Amino acid sequence: MAATASNPFPFPSRRPPDDSLFYAVYPLPLPSGLPAPALHASLQSLHLSLLSHLAPFLSSHLFHRDPFTLSLPADPAAPCALCASPPVPHLHGALRFGDSLPDEWLAVSLLFALTRAFPDIAARAWDSDGEFLLIEAAFALPRWLDPESAPNRVFIFRGELHILPPSLFPETPSLEAALAAVYDDSIDTRAADAIQAAIQRRIAWLPEKAAENLHTARVIVPAPVAKVLKEEPCLIARAVEGFYDRDIDTMKHAARMEKFLKGPGGEGVEMVRTTVRMTRAMYAQLVQQNFQAPRGYPMPRREEGPEKWMEAELGMKIACGFEMMYQERRRQGEEGKGSTWEVYRKSLEAAGCFEGLLPGREMESVDLDVNQFFKAMESVLGGGSQEQAGSDDGFDRKSSSSDIDFDDSDEDNDFAEELGDKDVDESFMESYSDALNKELSSTTLEKSFAHAPRPETNNEGPSDAAATDAEMTPVDVDLNLVESILNSYSSQQGLPGPASNLLGLMGVKVPPDAKKS
């Protein structure tokens, strides 16, 4: 589904996350008429060229949440699930920047750099606000450009922003037509200088000065954590995310610290001092939160100095983040598969839950004889006449024989005349109600409601009292409603609540000792 006037960003059924940037890169001119293998090979070649160009920067930079990357669609000839765009050959990507807004603009600067280095590609970027590049240049935009008219009009081409004017496309253009117009040198689609300047003010220092957003801290962590950070420094982003977004369930993993605080034999591990590189937002997320060290975590004494305590506290938070991240990923990886699932599946098979069906076997269709079903219903509901009872007996005898034809039209007509649709519904509801009352009579649910007064009996015979007790007297709905409201009001203990609000709307004032009265 492409972008529409009512949907400024091309997401058909859900709003994109607020902390994510989405982008797409299109080769120009758009390849057409290529078979699927050739199209895939062309996109793969472009993909490798773009990533190779960015590799020197991406290999050394640390992003707050997700790194900048590009990927090929699963099927280049099919509509893109990420971009929700028509089947236009392209590369795409998504970047979660979290609380680090500079990462979003860093990704935008990389798109500008790519289109500058590769003049035969165009790019576009959007987030939950839609065309956020236009928001940055809002004071310089022409009056006709708004969220309703922006779809498929804003592109990044050859290091500059291009906007397709309404004189070129009075209505929302298709993506193919828009890209063709951007690539056509005879058509002027370059945005005004004021718009270009507003965008360049945000990305002029990127990506060369992106390292200014990074911070290096000295921490004391368990040796396994230090080893992980040495081999994969980018995992600090996942550890901080796991710590910052922790909940009650993940906190249980941090309380045990089974992975990063215990050695192979269960003994404690060595604590080492190391340096960790992170974004400024990561450092702020770790420092601003008060967090008690898990029981058994080796923290230094405060008498050893504030510097060592701060290093150990920061390292403890990182270690807990690694523990929570690892255990959650491990649990998600085993859920629904693995040895535990195989044991559970085999137990279901042994219990006959699959009725001997093999994987991939088609389910058998239900062979239902409608006439036999109605006759069975008649026997269950119980006919009001002896003739119906006799008919039921005949059915019971016939149903035991496999060569009886239940399509006899005379019997169907007789049944339809004797038992109409209305009678069937009433009889069924009476039978169902009796069965339900009988089931409830053996439980304590009946005793939890207030009932209407029992009818007076003469008690002349022993069977009268027993019959009265056996029958469920009707529930007094009004009395139960009043009792429930008063109990709810009493439980508020004089404080505002739903019961007092409801009674106030009805103009009823209940005294404080309403329950006693």
Image (spheres, rainbow, N blue to C red):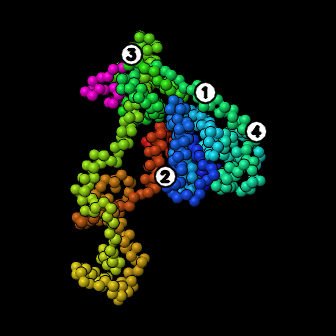
Given residues 332 and 226, the one toward you in this image is 226
Q: Which secondary structure lies at badge 1?
A: loop
Residue 430 - label? none
State which tag comes first along the sequence, 1 or 3: 1
For marks 1 and 3, give the CA distance. Answer: 37 Å
Q: Which secondary structure lies at badge 2?
A: loop
Looking at the rendering, the stretch of residues picked out in magenta corresponds to 255-271
Residue indicated by mark 4? 193
Residue indicated by mark 1? 209
Q: Residue at point 52% right, 54% down?
A: 38
Residue 283: image location, x then y, percent? 51, 25
Residue indicated by mark 2? 74
Q: Which secondary structure lies at badge 4?
A: helix
State which tag comes first along the sequence, 2 or 3: 2
Query: In the picture, which quadrant includes the N terminus?
Result: bottom right
For marks 2 and 4, give the CA distance. Answer: 38 Å
| In magenta segment, residue 260 | yes
Q: Residue at point 33% right, 85% down?
A: 407
Q: Which secondary structure lies at badge 3?
A: loop
Relative to 508, is 318 on the left or the right?
A: left
Please tell me whether mark 2 or mark 3 is closer to you in this view. Answer: 2
Q: Amino acid at mark 2?
A: Ala
Residue 324: image location, x then y, percent? 39, 33
For marks 1 and 4, give the CA distance. Answer: 24 Å
Q: Amino acid at mark 4?
A: Asp
Residue indicated by mark 3? 300
Q: Amino acid at mark 3?
A: Pro
| Circle 1 residues within 10 Å: few <14, some 14–19, many ≥20 | few
